[in-house]
Image (tube, rainbow, N blue to C red):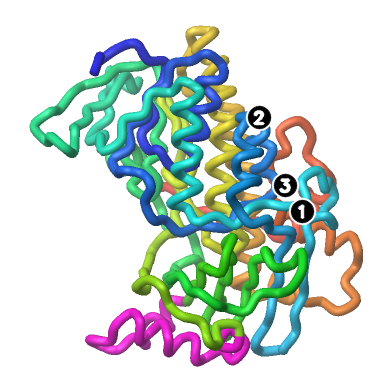
Amino acid sequence: MSNHGWDALILGGGPGGSTLAASLARRGRRALVLEREKFPRFHIGESLLPRSREVFAELGVDEELDRRFLRKYGARFLCCTTRRESTYRFEESFDPKFTYAYQVPRAEFDHVLLEHARKLGAEVREQWEATDVLFEGSRAVGVRAKNLLNPSEVVELFAPVVVDATGRDTLLASRTRRKANIARLDKTALFSHYRGTFRPSGQDEGNIQIVIFEHGWFWFIPFLGDVTSVGVVVSSEWMRQKQKGETLESFYDRTFARSPMASELLSGATRLRPVGALADFSYRIDQLAGDGWLFVGDAGGFLDPLFSTGAHLAIKGASLAAEAIDHALTTGDVSRAAFASYEANVRYAVDLFLGVVQSFYAGQFRETLFEPNQRTTIRRLITSILAGDVFHVERRPPWAAFLREHYPAEVPTFG
C-alpha cells in the first residue's frame, strides 16, 4: 500500500465514512477508507429517515436501496399509561419532498454503501485499523494503521485531511478532544431480531412502532420479509433491577412483561438472535473539526436511538463534510476555519434533535405527541422532525425557530 497519494483518509466504513468516500470520489477526490471489520457485519440503528434519501439520490444509490429495503412511510407511537396512540406520516411534514425512508438490516445496508463508494472510485481497505492520528503541531497529517490479518504490518499513511468516522470508538476524541455525556440521556438499549411480530396492514406495514412505558420505550422496526428488529431503551434506574447472574434474555423478557401493549405486538413471535446490550451511548465532542481533521457521524457524538437520528446525522453530515473538504482542498486551506460552516450546520441539526429528545424524556414532548385535537401546525412540525428535516443550510424556517425556543437543547459544558 502506498503511503501517499490521497486527498482524505477516512477512518471507518459505516454510513458516515462510506457516504463521505463516495461523495468525495464523485468529485474526483482520492479517498482511502480504513475499516477494521469485514463487511457485512451486524449493527443496530436500522430505521432511516426520509431526508437521507436526498443524499442517496446524489450518490446514485437510491434505486438499489429501493429494490432491497422495506419502505417506511411514518411512525406509530403507543403509550401504555394512557392507552393512546398516534401515527405520523411523512407526507404531513412542512416540506414533503421525500415521503418515505427505509427499514434496513444494517449488515446489508452498510455493505451496499461501502461497495458503492468502492464502485465510484474510493479505495477501501477492510480489516485495517487506524491506531493513531499523526500530527505536525496542531494539524493532522496522517494516521498510523495496522493490518488486522497481519498485525506485524504497521504503516503510516498521509493526506491533507483526516476524517474520524469510527463511530463510538471516537479515535480522535479519545486522544485529543474532550468528550462529555449528555444530560438526562443515561440510557441502556437491549435488542434482538424476531420473526412473526405484529405489523399494521397496507402502506403502514413498514412504519416503525414505538411503545412508551413507565421505564422507557420499545421499538419495532420491520424489514422486508417477516423479520423485525425489536428493542427497548430503559433508564439506568430500571437497569439496576437486573438481578445478579440474570441473563440478558431473562431481563429483556421481564422488561417486556411490564408492557402489555409491547407484549401484544410480540405475541407468538420467535427470537432469532441473542439479546444484545448497549449502554452509555449518549455523548458530545467539544469540537467537530480542527486543522486538517473532522469528525463525521457518531464519532462526533451520539444522541439517543429515539427518532432514529444517528444514521441520518451521519449520512447528511458526511455529505456536508465532502463539500467542505472539496472546497478546502481546492483553496489549499485545511485549517479549522475552512470547516466552520460544516461544524455550525451539523451542530444546528444535532441541537434541534437534542432539544426534542430531552423534552421527550422530561415529558413535555411526549405529551405533545398524543395531544387530542392537535393543531395542524404542531402535527406538521413533529412530522418534519421525524422526517429528519433538520439541516437548514440555506434558510432556517420559522417552525425550526419555534422548536428551538420551546424545546431548547441542554448541551454539556466543557471546562
Q: Position of residue 375 (x, y in %)?
A: 90, 67
Q: Which of pointers 2 and 3 indicates the residue nearer the eye?
A: 2
Instruction: Give, as a single range, the part of the protein colored magenta.
Output: 235-264
Q: Mark 3 touching mark 1, by CB under 8 A?
A: yes
Q: Is residue 385 left or right of residue 11?
A: right
- SS label for mark 3: loop
Residue pictured at 34% horizontal, 73% vertical: 274
What is the distance, in whole Å, between disc 3 and disc 1 at their CAs? 6 Å
Residue 58: mark in rendering: 2
* Disc 1 target residue: 384
The N terminus lies in which quarter of the figure?
A: top left
Quadrant of the image occupied by residue 12:
top left
Mark 3 or mark 1: whose residue is earlier in sequence: 1
* Disc 3 target residue: 389
Residue pictured at 36% horizontal, 69% vertical: 276
Tell whether position 203 is magenta: no
Residue pictured at 35% horizontal, 20% vertical: 139
Principal secondary structure, stretch drawn in magenta: helix
Residue 300: tell me if it is visible: no
Q: Position of residue 119 (x, y in %)?
A: 48, 26
Circle 1 packing at 10 Å, graded few (<14), some (14-19), many (20+), is many
